[in-house]
Image (tube, grey):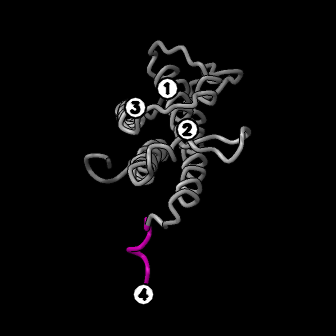
Amino acid sequence: MQTTSGKSTTEAQEFIEASRLFLSDFLPKLKQCVEEMREEDLWWRPNELSNSVGNLILHLCGNMKQWILTSMGERRYERDRDAEFSERGPLPKAQLLATIDRTVFEVDKLLAHLPASTLLERFPVQVYNTSRLQAIYHVVEHFSYHLGQILYIYKLRTGKDPGFYGHLSSR
């Protein structure tokens, strides 16, 4: 997902390109964990104060739709944030994966066509008055944060290391 020339020409373009690259790196890791988990493990939670993998995926989609697609893409979306966490499933694994795939694809498409000159434009999201740059930064950081939680649940439930960085091992 690099620019046509493979090089960014401004800091703003580099920021957009890096954000797209991070999301395109995070998504296959999330999908690998989900694909290797049993359906019932996707809705497991250690206690009522914790979230399941299914809840985290719904939450990530809601976050990306609200912060990027609705706010920047001017699409209509009524978010029910509480429902993202109260869902107990089981929504099928295939449905969860299709939803996050589609959402990340739509975010990437929007970012690919986002004029770098608009990054400092401000707009309201939730209780914030944010810039496009801040919204993108938030979404990338937020995805990373919850991917870490999903990875932890994956390891708890499967007892396996997903091997994301096996290619870097000197063994």
Element under disc 1? helix
In this rendering, the label closer to the viewer, 1 or 4:
4
Q: Earlier in the sequence, mark 2 or mark 1?
A: 1
In whole angstroms, how far apart are the C-alphas of marks 2 and 3?
16 Å
Q: Earlier in the sequence, mark 3 or mark 1?
A: 1
Q: Earlier in the sequence, mark 4 or mark 2?
A: 2
In whole angstroms, how far apart are the C-alphas of marks 4 and 3?
37 Å
Q: Position of residue 32 (x, y in %)?
A: 40, 53
Mark on residue 84? none
In this rendering, the label closer to the viewer, 4 or 2:
4
Q: Dot 2: within a 10 Å radius of its alpha carbon, few (fewer than 14), some, or many (20 or more) residues?
A: many
Q: Are marks 2 and 1 in contact (CB under 8 Å)?
A: no
Dominant secondary structure (helix, strand or loop) of the stretch shown in magenta? loop
Q: Earlier in the sequence, mark 1 or mark 4?
A: 1
Q: Badge 3 is on which residue?
A: 99
Q: Position of residue 129 (x, y in %)?
A: 68, 23
In whole angstroms, how far apart are the C-alphas of marks 4 and 2?
35 Å
Q: Amino acid at mark 2?
A: Val
Q: Earlier in the sequence, mark 2 or mark 3?
A: 3
Mark on residue 65? 1
Q: Amino acid at mark 3?
A: Thr
| In this picture, residue 128 sits left or right of residue 97 | right
Between 125 and 63, the one lying in front of the other is 63
- Write the start and end of the magenta stretch as one range: 163-171
Q: Tag count in the figure? A: 4
Mark on residue 171? 4
Q: Amino acid at mark 4?
A: Arg
